[in-house]
Image (spheres, rainbow, N blue to C red):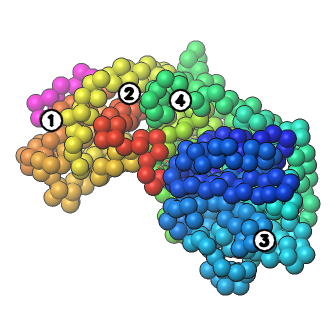
């Protein structure tokens, strides 16, 4: 959940480290710090709060340093404060460590390997103590890291420097608490938690695997196993575009990313949905051996795993898989899945949905599925991420960089990818009628225009946000495909505006939540689904009868809720099975409108991080 960077080369390290950290701030932003090295000196500067606080402190400091490490933190052990910010040092100030993830046995390690007093509450500091202990005992830096790997339990990655070897960085990765990627260039090396931080500096990358150690000098990068065995690894070339990550004229990344969704949909369908033949084809993306027609016919169950917004996308995808591919499908929250000893076999297709491809619980769920021999597909927005390395096949979301912590365009990209995958699987299994394929492809290609229409309604949605921005509690209700939309609406509102919001299946309302209804508790009712429309009408009437205000989210042309709802939020009338897409976009704008009115930090909400790499 934290971001780590390191640099060694000919250029000014502080600038490069700060710049790379700014690209990792989405991983955590409660404090940050940097260690800079010259031939004779190591200086550590840390600050509580966002990266700009560190920048201010850094002005004019150590401008001649040509190597260093940096960190942006999401607190796990110890409150956000300067003393708990990384880098953490040993008691003599010889080595500095930045770390992501959790050292589970840190308290025991403190007892056993402490080299003196500890000055922070972090689990990280003991790594610096262990490292200096190893160096003092005559170990080389890589050997000292080996010692750490043999003793420290958990899932973590870290980078360290030794002030007596000022052009050298060492790092390691254990488990799935976020990766370490090394960008290779002539005469300099740069390393970070993920590739997005390295894009301006390199196009060639080495991805560290679990239980590997990296020894980095300006023009040499060496990889070792945790036993010290040297590994040969060729860099991978990736061409990615750093410019698209810029905020442009938008006030917030979240707003920019909401507005990018028509294009996100087009990019997600490009090369998969053919407008001319009205057919779907994902064959080039699926591993032919694992997903041959014969193997697909054998699949008797699908399991989609994900967390948060990605899980809500998965819940929509379940409807698609059952309807178009005719495969019984379950959706599981990855974190729950891994601990309930799931029954799996090689006839269960496991689909993981994760924009980052680094979510620790989803990775653990995938490992569970791997042990059981399940074929796996991952949907990810991050080239080279961990899930893409674990799965048999990857369906890239092609959503472009999503910087705001709240997922918007990656959810829409996940939903369309699941729609395409379901159609394709149905077709391969011989269970999808050609006319259904044609109709679905045709309808899906209308989505970019439908979402543009929602964006044209921004002013109307904003007026509703204005009207309801003082409410401190919200209920979101939906049935069928409206249910995951309700869950996502509630999640978006609570994370960006800090308003308490509950998403419920509307059928559940009378089993408890109705007790909450009064004139202080508005409800947002998702009413775009034809087959459950009348039931939603009844729910709305029941809420109104108890004094609750209701905003009905309806399809254009549906005036049936006008007389009973307090307000309506209108989205384009499209094929009901695809209606979650414009509905989710409308709810994103609604949450954004409320959050900005309440002065919340929309792009970096408190306590959150974009990628959750710790349990
Ligand atoms: O990277 P992932 O898609 O695996 O992330 C899963 C969740 O942490 C994520 O969807 C989260 O709920 C959203 N950022 C909330 O907007």
Q: Position of residue 47 (x, y in %)?
A: 57, 55
Instruction: Judge the density around disc 2: few (<14), some (14-19), many (≥20) Cα neighbours within 10 Å.
Output: some
Q: Is residue 606 above or below residue 343?
A: above
- Tag nearer the camera, 3 or 1: 3
Q: Earlier in the sequence, mark 4 or mark 1?
A: 4
- SS for tag 1? loop
Q: Earlier in the sequence, mark 3 or mark 1?
A: 3
| In-front residue for pair 363/459 | 459
In the picture of the structure, the residue carrying the numbered disc 4 is 247
Name the residue tied to disc 2. 575
Q: Residues within 10 Å of mark 1 (few under 14, many from 20)?
A: many
Region in magenta:
554-565
Q: Residue furthest front?
A: 60
Q: Is residue 74 above or below residue 589?
A: below
Q: Label 2 vs label 1: CA separation?
A: 23 Å
Residue 114, x across and y down, in percent: 70, 80
Depth-wise, is mark 2 or mark 3 nearer the camera?
Answer: 3
Residue 94 image point, x, y percent: 78, 67
Give the residue pinned by disc 3. Answer: 131
Q: Residues within 10 Å of mark 4 (few under 14, many from 20)?
A: some
Q: Earlier in the sequence, mark 2 or mark 1?
A: 1
Q: Is residue 393 left or right of residue 53?
A: right
Q: Nearer the viewer, mark 4 or mark 1?
A: 4
Judge the density around disc 3: few (<14), some (14-19), many (≥20) Cα neighbours within 10 Å.
many
| Residue in view at x 64 percent, y 24 percent | 271
x, y percent for residue 574: 36, 25
Q: Label 3 vs label 4: CA separation?
A: 40 Å
Residue under numbered circle 1: 565
- Quadrant in which residue 366 is drawn: bottom right
Residues under numbered marks 4 and 2 in contact, where contact means CB atoms less than 8 Å apart: no
């Amino acid at each position: 959940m934290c971001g780590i960077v390191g640099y060694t080369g000919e250029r000014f390290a502080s600038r490069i480290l700060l710049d790379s950290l700014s690209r990792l701030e989405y991983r955590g932003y409660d404090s940050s710090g940097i260690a800079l090295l010259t031939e004779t000196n190591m200086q550590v500067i840390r600050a509580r709060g966002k990266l700009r606080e560190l920048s201010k402190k850094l002005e004019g400091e150590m401008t001649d340093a040509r190597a260093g490490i940096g960190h942006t933190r999401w607190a796990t052990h110890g409150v956000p404060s300067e003393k708990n910010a990384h880098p953490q040092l040993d008691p003599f100030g010889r080595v500095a460590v930045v770390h992501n993830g959790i050292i589970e046995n840190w308290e025991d390690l403190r007892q056993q390997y402490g080299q003196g007093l500890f000055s922070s509450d972090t689990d990280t500091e003991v790594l610096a103590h262990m490292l200096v202990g190893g160096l003092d005992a005559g170990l080389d830096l890589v050997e000292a890291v080996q010692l750490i790997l043999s003793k420290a339990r958990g899932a973590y990655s870290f980078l360290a420097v030794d002030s007596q070897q000022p052009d050298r960085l060492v790092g390691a990765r254990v488990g799935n608490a976020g990766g370490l990627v090394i960008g290779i260039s002539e005469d300099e090396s740069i390393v970070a938690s993920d590739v997005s931080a390295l894009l301006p500096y390199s196009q060639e990358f080495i991805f560290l695997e679990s239980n590997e150690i990296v020894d980095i000098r300006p023009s040499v990068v060496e990889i070792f196993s945790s036993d010290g065995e040297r590994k040969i690894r060729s860099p991978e070339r990736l061409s990615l575009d750093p410019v698209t990550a810029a905020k442009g004229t938008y006030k917030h990344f979240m707003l920019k990313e909401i507005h990018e969704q028509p294009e996100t949909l087009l990019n997600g369908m490009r090369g998969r949905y053919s407008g001319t033949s009205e057919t779907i084809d994902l064959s080039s993306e699926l591993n032919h051996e694992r997903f041959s027609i014969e193997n697909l016919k054998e699949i008797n169950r699908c399991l989609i795993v994900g967390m948060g917004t990605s899980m809500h996308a998965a819940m929509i995808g379940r409807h698609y898989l059952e309807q178009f591919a005719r495969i019984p499908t379950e959706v599981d929250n990855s974190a729950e899945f891994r601990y309930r000893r799931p029954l799996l076999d090689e006839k269960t297709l496991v689909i993981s949905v994760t924009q980052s491809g680094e979510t620790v619980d989803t990775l653990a769920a995938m490992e569970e599925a791997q042990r059981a021999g399940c074929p796996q597909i991952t949907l990810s927005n991050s080239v080279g991420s961990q899930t893409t390395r674990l799965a048999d096949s990857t369906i890239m979301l092609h959503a472009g960089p999503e910087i705001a912590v709240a997922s918007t365009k990656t959810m829409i990209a996940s939903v369309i990818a699941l729609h395409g995958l379901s159609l394709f699987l149905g077709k391969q299994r011989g269970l999808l009628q050609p006319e259904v394929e044609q109709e679905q492809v045709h309808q899906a290609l209308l989505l970019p225009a439908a979402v543009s229409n929602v964006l044209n309604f921004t002013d109307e949605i904003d007026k509703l946000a204005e009207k309801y921005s003082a409410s401190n509690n919200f209920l979101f209700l939906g049935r069928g495909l409206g249910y995951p939309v309700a869950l996502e609406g509630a999640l978006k509102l609570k994370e960006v505006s800090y308003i308490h919001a509950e998403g419920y299946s509307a059928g559940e309302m009378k089993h408890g939540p109705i007790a909450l209804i009064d004139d202080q508790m508005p409800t947002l009712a998702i009413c775009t689904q034809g087959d459950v429309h009348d039931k939603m009408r009844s729910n709305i009437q029941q809420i109104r009868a108890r004094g609750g205000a209701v905003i009905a989210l309806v399809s254009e042309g549906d005036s049936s809720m006008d007389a009973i709802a307090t307000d309506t939020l209108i989205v384009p009338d499209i094929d009901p099975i695809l209606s979650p897409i414009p509905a989710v976009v409308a709810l994103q704008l609604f949450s954004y409108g409320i959050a900005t009115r309440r002065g919340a930090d929309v792009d970096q909400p408190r306590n959150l991080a974009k990628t959750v790499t710790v349990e």
